[in-house]
């Protein structure tokens, strides 16, 4: 009988079979699995953080002994922190969420995680174990919101408990695996003074916008994706007096209003049977029956633009909203398009008359090439003239070149034009004087 070929044995998972990175990944995975397997979920939920860390420390010792590994104090602490993040956080990206210098997190599949810091994109050395690991973190984010993500519904918008915006898209739509984009909001909402310090707007613009909001002018914030529209909307909302009732309508609740009387409303996607969807348009219609002093729509993306204009024209002055557009003139054209999406057969002139009587001010936000976010125009919507709408810039961002370190040199300047609604400002006790509109020397 011929001798049988010797069976190849599977490589050991011990120290000699894998590199240090793989060994630590094995330890982390086994500690996590043991923790979930040997601790009842109800007990795990009610553990204090100190108790959880103590349990993780014990299991780390057990697993490292089983694998014959000796861990340094620094590596042991890192492993324990990673397992803690898996249990009560969001896995590998928890540290990035806790980092105040990170403004956006982009997960492009399990092995590619980018962040934005100071307007610049950089790749991190963080990784997930596999696609399933990314999916578990996505489920942890969306489960409390009652949203779902599967092959029949492969895209979802959600938010973290702190209000940070989350978008996820999975295969088959995403070729590289699950993709998660998180736009972080600061734990402490930015104040108008912060934005002046960042150069987003000037002190004169801050004074002017505060007067406009307090005088109950209707303001539309426009800009491209990631230009800072929501941050500016938050800042404008901080000027609303504390004794007014504010109703907000959003796809995912992101606004961080500081007033005591705020009623946040959030849209709802359809369930697994395709029923039960509540749209922004339905929310806007409903909030008209809720006795609001101010209505804030997080973003107009469709037919709700018509309902928002009608609300502004029927006694709900001082309303605020945002939409995507590249310039004040483009904002008006896009607003016309959104109104037509409502399915109402309105002539273009009637739509433009609605816009002219509803919108008082357009605040145009831009994200410059160096990553900074600036208000590029504050523009008054004045009147109809023939078939067109007349608009006039009150403040404008003037670019003057690029510094040696690649930063764009730009300054905010008044154009010298006094808005037509000055009498309305004065009637509401907002007397600005003429100096604020005088171009700087």
Image (cartoon, rainbow, N blue to C red):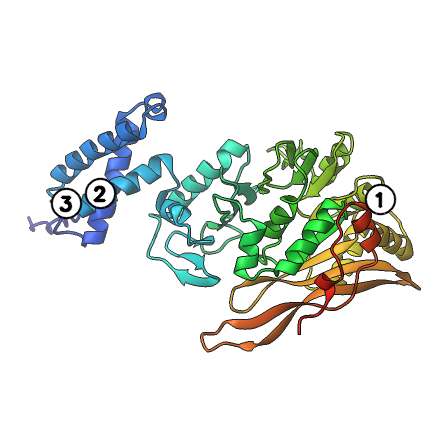
Q: Nearest to the eye among marks 1 and 2: give it.
A: 1
Q: Residue sitting at 61 percent across and 52 percent down?
A: 232
The first of marks 1 and 2 along the sequence is 2
Q: Nearer the viewer, residue 110 or 181?
A: 181
Residue at (67, 48) in percent of width and height? 299
For disc 2, the neighbor class at 10 Å (few under 14, some 14 to 19, many from 20) is few
Q: Residue 62: percent from the left, percent from the top?
A: 15, 34
Rounded to the nearest angstrom, the CA distance separating label 1 from label 2 is 60 Å
Q: Which mark is residue 71?
A: 3
Asked which secondary structure carries label 1, the reply is: helix
Q: CA distance from mark 2 to mark 3?
A: 9 Å
Q: CA distance from mark 3 to mark 1?
A: 68 Å
**Residue 165 placed where, x, y %?**
53, 46
Q: Nearer the viewer, mark 2 or mark 3?
A: 2
| x 56%, y 62%: residue | 199
Q: Which residue is mark 2?
A: 77
Left or right: 148 as drawn, with respect to 269 = left
**Residue that carries the numbered disc 1 in the rendered image:** 313
Q: Nearer the viewer, residue 413 or 314?
A: 413
Q: Which mark is residue 101?
A: none
Whichever of callouts 3 and 1 sits on the residue coming sooner in the sequence is 3
């Amino acid at each position: 009988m011929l001798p049988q070929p010797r069976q190849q044995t599977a490589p050991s998972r011990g120290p000699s079979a894998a590199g240090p990175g793989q060994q630590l990944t094995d330890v982390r995975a086994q500690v996590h699995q043991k923790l979930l397997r040997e601790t009842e979920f109800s007990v795990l939920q009610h553990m204090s953080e100190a108790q959880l860390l103590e349990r993780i420390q014990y299991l780390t010792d057990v697993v490292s002994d089983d694998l014959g590994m000796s861990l340094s104090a620094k590596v042991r602490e890192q492993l324990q922190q990673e397992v803690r993040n898996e249990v009560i956080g969001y896995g590998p990206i928890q540290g990035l969420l806790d980092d105040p210098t990170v403004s956006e997190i982009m997960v492009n599949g399990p092995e590619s995680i980018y962040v934005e810091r100071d307007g610049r994109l950089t790749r991190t050395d963080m990784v997930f174990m596999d696609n399933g690991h990314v999916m578990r973190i996505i489920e942890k984010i969306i489960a409390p919101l009652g949203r779902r993500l599967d092959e029949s519904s492969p895209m979802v918008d959600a938010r973290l408990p702190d209000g940070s915006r989350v978008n996820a898209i999975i295969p088959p739509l995403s070729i590289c695996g699950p993709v998660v984009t998180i736009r972080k909001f600061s734990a402490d909402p930015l104040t108008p003074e912060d934005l002046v310090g960042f150069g987003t707007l000037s002190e004169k613009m801050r004074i002017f916008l505060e007067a406009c909001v307090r005088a109950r002018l209707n303001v539309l914030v426009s800009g491209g994706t990631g230009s800072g529209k929501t941050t500016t909307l938050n800042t404008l909302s901080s000027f609303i007096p504390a004794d007014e009732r504010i109703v907000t309508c959003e796809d995912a609740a992101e606004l961080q209003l500081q007033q005591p009387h705020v009623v946040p409303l959030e849209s709802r996607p359809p369930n697994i049977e395709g029923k039960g969807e509540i749209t922004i348009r339905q929310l806007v219609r409903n909030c008209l029956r809720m006795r609001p002093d101010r209505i804030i729509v997080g973003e107009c993306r469709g037919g709700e633009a018509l309902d928002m204009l009608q609300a502004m024209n029927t006694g709900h002055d001082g309303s605020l909203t945002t939409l995507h557009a590249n310039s004040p003139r483009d904002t008006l054209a896009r607003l016309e398009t959104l109104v037509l999406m409502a399915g109402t057969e309105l002539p273009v002139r009637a739509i433009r008359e609605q816009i002219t009587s509803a919108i008082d001010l357009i605040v145009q936000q831009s994200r410059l090439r160096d990553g900074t976010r600036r208000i590029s125009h504050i523009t008054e919507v004045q009147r109809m003239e023939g078939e067109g709408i007349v608009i006039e810039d009150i403040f404008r961002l003037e670019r003057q070149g690029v510094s040696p370190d690649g930063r764009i040199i730009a300054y905010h300047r008044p154009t010298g034009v006094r808005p037509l609604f000055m009498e309305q400002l004065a009637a509401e006790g907002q007397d600005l004087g003429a100096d604020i509109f005088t171009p700087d020397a």
